[in-house]
Image (spheres, coloured by chain):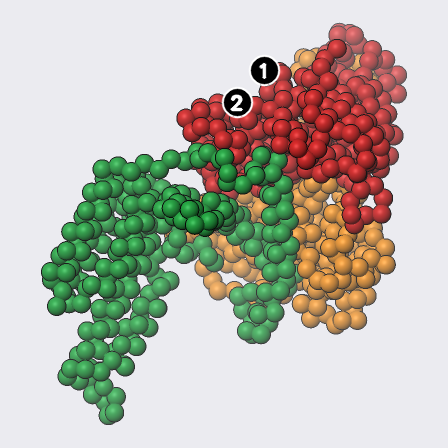
Chain colours: A orange, B green, C red
């Protein structure tokens, strides 16, 4: 299922003294099966974009296409549930949305809201709990007796059990330690690979964006600043740095090295391994460029 | 959803009303609420309306915001008006439809009471529009100060109020966030049968309670770590400043009161 | 030898609702003017340690002494005057309705006269570069700005030690940089002692000394260079190693000799440039 934003504008608290323009003329496409990263600073508009992806917000101008459904500014929309079933969102700190007595009930909550039978929801819960790396015995526990990391996984399982066609992740690793961060990122990448699940990652982390995404969309002050593959985006790192945006540490390091050496190294490296190879052959005289 | 309501929100500006001591504003509001009941004929209502319009002008708040702020309460005013039109009897019947009639007195009362209602709302919103909640709290703490002598917990009450005020926006953001998260999981808050919508409150309230308890706990720890151990021996950072303008405004209201007494029927 | 400010001896702490202690016989020292990082994965006991340091929790066993006071019910308020704490969640420690009110909160508690408060609030906010936000309300501030206000609230009280209890873990990269940059400056200018409790190894790399916690015990302590030599072991403990260290190691493995371990990108670049690059 494709999602497409066409010339979106969004104003918070329109027609009040507190009106604020959050997005202006944003267009972007999320083709089926892709892994897209949306990055930018806090306040760049990336969270507002996210909420348009399953019609939690309706644009004040422009059109959003979610599969065959068209959501247009200024029109009353009914039955948005059908849209939300297909686009699951894992919000930042998703453990804050847990509320049921047991983990199983909480995971079943989403699917059952969308009309899935109880038996089917339970089946999905037992699949989802293992997908997030927990064991089935946790299903009977209260979510509030779990550790923070486990609660996060249960909340994620609750979204996976909806069996969405697109999954949207808002800073899914915020507050986790390095191990937890890597495990969660790998988990979603695995799902993306195995099930061809369209994935949208909204993040501050250029590292994660460079490591996992096919395409990166950089938001800046409510507009799309740039989009392209990671190597396209990071081929001109200085422009990003001048905008006050981060670049992955590998890219930043290569840039510093090139500035010190006064010459380019040929290709843009996105992993430490690549950079090591390039630097090694560069220093050993065999200049790759 | 809540963001459209203007009542109770502060709009910063540099005006006489903004600069006044919150204590004088509180005293004026209190007196105003009392003297509104003095008005009982067109002249007295005209005086009150003139005073209210003057205050609104002094606040430098754009009239369209004031009017927009009134919108949510208009149906209440309308309801009051209709109630009086249909049920207050007295004087000559103006409209007669079988057993149903609208009387002169009904029209009179209806207009007066709704007007009274509107004036009260305008004046109280002027207070909140021109005074930050924390100023109101400081003002109240100072005005209630004498009650400390009878062991009334004035400091604790004021601190509680200021912390609640501080956390209202945070909780609103939190509510919005949890609501959206549950909407993404298929909950409908704005459409569907009433029964379902009532049920939908549970997945909103439980997380909200849990996070509020957690916040309260963490906040208490943070306050303790910063040396908070009750009101005893504490100094105050915010000082209230009563000026000539404050005395002047109270005198103005006293004059209005006199006029009302003179002109009431 | 720098003056010892904090000493823990055989400290054990167990939460009521848990079966094993969060801290097991911990002994450590903190010296005046140093930046000590206490690292460990979530649940390693590092945050409990922070709460013990300023008497928010009392250990069941062992001794805690801070600036010459041995921790007890009687001394706890004196100790809190010496230690300022910045907590994890920027929202849940912001007490005041505006920036200046929040900074003043601690001063009000300490009974500082109003005139003196005004200058101390302004000075403290100036130090964290938030002096143009005096009347801003917390919900209009970014996480990094709120944490800087929290730091100002502590500075205004002029403590000897500042503890950052995972103070950057909920921030975006920019906020993290703001906070760490601020702390670094303070340490240099005011010689304030810093204890940062974190799982961010980039943050820990800035410290003078690192203590690695695991399962309620001190796993290892040493300088950042020493600690980052642990390499795979750190990853096994649920942590990570800073990027320059990782890259340095990989370069060495491909046969490029490096004189030492580099903690900052600049140093590594300089090394590669001066000793290996031949035109």
Q: Residue A94 carries which label?
A: none
Residue at the spot 54% in from the left edge and 69% down from the top edge: B191
Task: Say if B88 sits above or below B232 in the image.
Answer: below
Q: Residues within 10 Å of mark 1 (few under 14, many from 20)?
A: few
Subunit of label 2: C
Q: What element carries label 1?
A: helix
Residue at the spot 19% in from the left edge and 53% down from the top edge: B51
Q: Is residue A151 left or right of residue B25?
A: right
Q: Quadrant of residue C87?
A: top right
Residue at the spot 66% in from the left edge and 30% down from the top edge: C75
Q: How crowded is mark 2: few (under 14 residues within 10 Å), some or many (20 or more)?
A: some
Nearer-N-terminus badge (1/2): 2
The foreground one among B183 and C168 is: C168
Q: Which mark is residue C127?
A: 2
Q: Where is residue A206 in the image (x, y as percent from the top left)?
A: 67, 34
Q: Position of residue B58 (x, y in %)?
A: 24, 45
Q: Where is residue C139 in the image (x, y as percent from the top left)?
A: 51, 42
Q: Is mark 1 in CB contact (under 8 Å) with mark 2? A: yes
Task: Say if C12 sits above or below B169 in the image.
Answer: above
The foreground one among B177 and C31 is: C31
Q: Can residue B48 be seen in this view?
A: yes
Q: Which residue lies furthest to the bottom in this view?
A: B98
Residue beneath disc 1? C189
Subunit of label 1: C
The CA span between labels 1 and 2 is: 10 Å
């Amino acid at each position: 299922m494709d999602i497409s934003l066409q010339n979106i504008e969004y104003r918070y608290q329109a027609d009040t003294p507190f009106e604020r323009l959050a997005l202006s003329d944003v267009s972007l496409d999320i083709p089926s099966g892709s892994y897209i990263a949306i990055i930018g600073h806090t306040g760049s508009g990336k969270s507002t974009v996210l909420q348009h992806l399953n019609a939690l917000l309706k644009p004040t101008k422009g059109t959003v296409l979610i599969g065959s459904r068209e959501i247009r500014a200024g029109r009353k929309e009914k039955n948005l549930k059908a849209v939300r079933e297909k686009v699951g969102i894992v919000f930042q700190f998703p453990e804050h949305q847990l509320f049921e007595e047991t983990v199983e009930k909480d995971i079943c909550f989403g699917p059952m809201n969308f009309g899935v039978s109880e038996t089917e929801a339970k089946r999905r819960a037992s699949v989802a709990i293992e997908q997030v790396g927990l064991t089935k015995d946790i299903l009977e526990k209260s979510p509030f007796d779990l550790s923070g990391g486990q609660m996060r996984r249960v909340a994620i399982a609750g979204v996976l059990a909806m069996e969405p066609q697109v999954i949207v992740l808002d800073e899914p690793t915020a507050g986790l330690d390095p191990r937890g961060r890597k495990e969660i990122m790998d988990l979603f990448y695995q799902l993306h690979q195995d099930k061809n699940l369209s994935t949208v990652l909204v993040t501050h982390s250029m590292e994660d964006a460079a490591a996992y995404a096919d395409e990166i969309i950089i938001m800046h002050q409510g507009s799309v600043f740039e989009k392209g593959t990671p190597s396209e985006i990071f081929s001109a790192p200085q422009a990003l740095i001048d905008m006050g945006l981060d670049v992955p540490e590998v890219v930043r390091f290569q840039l510093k090295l090139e500035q010190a050496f006064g010459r380019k190294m040929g290709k843009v490296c996105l992993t430490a391994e690549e950079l090591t190879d390039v630097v090694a052959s560069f220093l050993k005289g065999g200049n790759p460029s | 959803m809540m963001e459209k309501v203007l009542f109770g929100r502060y709009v910063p500006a540099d005006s006489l009303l903004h600069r006044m001591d919150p204590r004088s504003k509180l005293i004026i509001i209190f007196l105003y609420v009392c003297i509104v009941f003095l008005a009982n004929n067109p002249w007295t209502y005209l005086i009150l309306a003139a005073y209210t319009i003057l205050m609104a002008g002094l606040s430098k708040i754009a009239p369209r915001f004031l009017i927009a702020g009134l919108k949510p309460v208009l149906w209440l005013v309308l309801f009051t008006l209709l109630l009086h039109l249909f049920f207050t009897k007295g004087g000559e019947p103006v409209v007669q439809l079988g057993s149903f009639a609208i009387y002169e007195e009904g029209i009179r009362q209806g207009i007066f009471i709704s007007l009274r209602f509107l004036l009260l709302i305008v004046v109280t919103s002027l207070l909140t529009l021109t005074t930050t909640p924390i100023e109101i709290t400081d003002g109240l703490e100072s005005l209630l100060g004498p009650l400390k002598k009878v062991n009334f917990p004035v400091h604790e009450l004021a601190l509680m109020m200021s912390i609640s005020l501080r956390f209202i926006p945070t909780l609103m953001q939190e509510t919005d966030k949890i609501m959206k998260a549950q909407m993404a999981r298929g909950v409908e808050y704005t459409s569907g049968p009433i029964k379902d919508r009532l049920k939908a409150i549970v997945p909103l309230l439980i997380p909200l309670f849990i996070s509020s308890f957690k916040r309260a706990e963490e906040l208490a720890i943070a306050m303790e770590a910063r040396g908070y151990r009750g009101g005893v021996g504490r100094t105050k950072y915010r000082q209230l400043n009563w000026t000539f303008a404050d005395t002047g405004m109270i005198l103005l209201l006293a004059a209005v009161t006199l006029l009302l007494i003179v002109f009431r029927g | 030898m720098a003056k010892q400010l904090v000493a823990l001896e055989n400290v054990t702490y167990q939460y009521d609702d848990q079966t094993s202690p969060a801290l097991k016989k911990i002994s450590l020292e903190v010296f005046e003017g140093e930046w000590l990082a206490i690292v460990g994965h979530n649940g390693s006991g590092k945050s409990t340690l922070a709460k013990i340091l300023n008497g928010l929790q009392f250990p069941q066993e062992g001794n805690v002494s801070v600036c010459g006071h041995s921790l007890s019910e009687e001394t706890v308020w004196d100790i809190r005057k010496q230690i300022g704490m910045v907590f994890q969640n920027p929202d849940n420690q912001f007490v005041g309705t505006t920036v200046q009110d929040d900074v003043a909160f601690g001063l009000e508690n300490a009974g500082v006269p109003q005139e003196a408060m005004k200058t101390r609030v302004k000075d403290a906010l100036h130090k964290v570069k938030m002096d143009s936000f005096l009347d801003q309300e917390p919900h209009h501030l970014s996480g990094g700005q709120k944490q800087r206000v929290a730091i100002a609230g502590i500075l205004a009280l002029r403590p000897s030690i500042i503890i950052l209890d995972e103070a950057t873990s909920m921030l975006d990269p920019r906020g993290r940089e703001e906070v760490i940059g601020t702390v670094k400056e303070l340490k240099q200018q005011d010689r304030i002692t810093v204890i940062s409790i974190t799982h961010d190894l980039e943050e820990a790399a800035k410290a003078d000394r690192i203590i690695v916690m695991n399962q309620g015990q001190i796993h290892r302590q040493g300088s950042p260079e020493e600690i980052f030599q642990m390499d795979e072991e750190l990853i096994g403990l649920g942590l990570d190693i800073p990027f320059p260290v990782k890259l340095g190691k990989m370069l060495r493995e491909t046969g490029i000799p490096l004189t030492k371990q580099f903690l900052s990108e600049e140093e590594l670049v300089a090394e590669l440039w001066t000793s290996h690059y031949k035109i």
